[in-house]
Image (tube, helix red, strand yellow):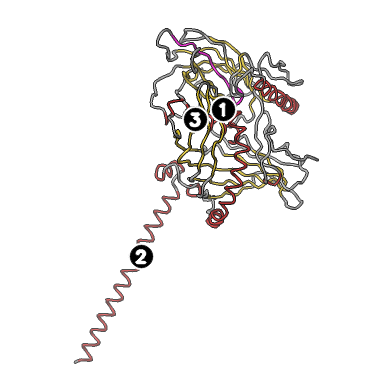
Amino acid sequence: MGLISGMLMGMVIGIALMAGWQYMMRYRSTKRIAKAVDIKLLGSLSRDDLKKLCGDNFPEWISFPMFEQVKWMNKQLSKLWPFIADAATIIIRESVEPLLEEYRPPGITSLKFSKLSLGNVAPKIEGIRVQSLQKGQITMDIDFRWGGDPSIILAVEAALVASIPIQLKDLQVFTVVRVIFQLTDEIPCISAVVVALLSEPKPRIDYTLKAVGGSLTALPGISDMIDDTVNTIVTDMLQWPHRIVVPIGGIPVDTSELELKPQGKLSVTVVKANDLKNMEMLGKSDPYAVVYVRPLFKVKTKVINNNLNPVWNEVFELIAEDKETQSLILEVFDKDVAGQDKRLGIAKLPLINVEPDTPLPQEMDLRLLPALDMMKIKDKKDRGTITIKVLYHQFNKEEQLAALEEEKKLLEERKKMKEAGVIGSTMDALDGAASFVGSGVGMVGTGLGAGVGIVGSGFGAVGSGLSKAGRFMGRSITGQSSAPKKSGTSTPQENGGAKQA
């Protein structure tokens, strides 16, 4: 009896175990299938879908599998950061302070670092993508994030106002850095390095400003001025197509093919503006328009007094260095005799939307906005429109070389005008049409008295081997040159639109 009951119990337990095991396997199979479906759906999500799920700060490797994680590099970077921070502080102070002075906005007489320390928190590299876009080059895109604890205090001076220390707090940097290595058959196998910030995704530098021992109200509009200065330096010096070119290891190398060159001439006729916003309590605004491709080289129209529908019909000639990524910017200001001029509106025309070498200029009506970044603007009311005519001419090789030589001369002229006190800052817009000089280019020559061309690009920061700060010399850091070597760069694109009449 005991034997039979034992056998029955064993059979029952065995059947129960087999049933349980089968149920568990079926359950695990169902879960695996569900996870596979989820992974497939996640893999089908676009970049925009991931932005909605993760916000703006999602790592690049999530949406692009070619971005590889580099946790080992972040560990080493954390250990090396105290030494890197000390060296970088010296380089930033020596290289960025001249930029702050060069891009100093009108209304501020001095803008310098009072205190600069990069803190103890190292940057984080979320991912790296390595590509071979050109023969003889290796292109590396680095997803760079930094939410550090730096101590940065700016000494800001304005007319009739003593120096005010302003602290930059809660600094955060989000950008993708493109590094291009120019290869050679000699040790260390790299002859030059090109560094730039990709324009897409757009670089983000977030911070808050706080007056130390005072109030920001002592300098009205100082926050906007500093924001504009930072954005201008980033977009005009570091963001693609602008780049830093650094010769490496003392190897003689021709970096001319890596440097930014003029691509074409942009003839802009500022025709008129309509329905401008009135900024005056008595009478009407006195508008004028500022035109530029690069913020460092602005030109402006004459002032039309007491008119919200001004007609200018003035022609300007500007230089484009990368038609695929650069834009024409038009700002309309209200002239204020006593105080600072107020901006009535701004418009942006991506040059990629302009047809090259058309027989007749393209006429366009552009809507004026309070700012290009509308996320920070509360007043989103209509600011009117501005009408322009645009004609773009693509340079041939001879015209490009002539333009490259002439723009260097014009850049020096503008600096001499600043030293002579003709303009208060290199950011000041010049009156009159901006002409471009160059034999073989077929454009009218100009000097200090007739206006200055839109010229120059690039900035140098460090010496050979990235070891010490250098001085700013045109488009690249000074280095040796010898027989030309094949090189090149890729060009990311960004799209935009404009209303065409």
Provide residue 58's location: percent of width, then percent of height: 45, 46
Q: Residues within 10 Å of mark 3 (few under 14, many from 20)?
A: many
Farthest-out residue, right: 483
Say which of marks 1 and 2 sits in front: 1
> Which one is closest to the eye, mark 3 or mark 2?
3
The residue mark sitting in front, 1 or 3, is 3
Circle 2 — which element?
A: helix
In the rendered structure, are the residues bearing label 3 and label 2 in contact, judged by CB atoms less than 8 Å apart? no
Give the residues drawn in magenta, as a range.
284-297
| Type of the residue with mark 2 | Arg
Q: CA distance from mark 1 to mark 2?
A: 69 Å
> Can you name the residue that lies furthest to the left here?
1
Q: Residue at x 60, y 45 (%)?
A: 88
Residue 10, disc: none
Residue indicated by mark 3: 164
Is residue 352 in sight in this rendering? no
Q: Which residue is mark 1?
A: 110
Whether residue 295 is in magenta: the answer is: yes
Residue 266 appears in the rendering: yes
Q: Which mark is residue 28?
A: 2
Choose between 290 and 44: the one closer to the eye. Answer: 290
The amino acid type, in three-letter code, at marker 1 is Ser
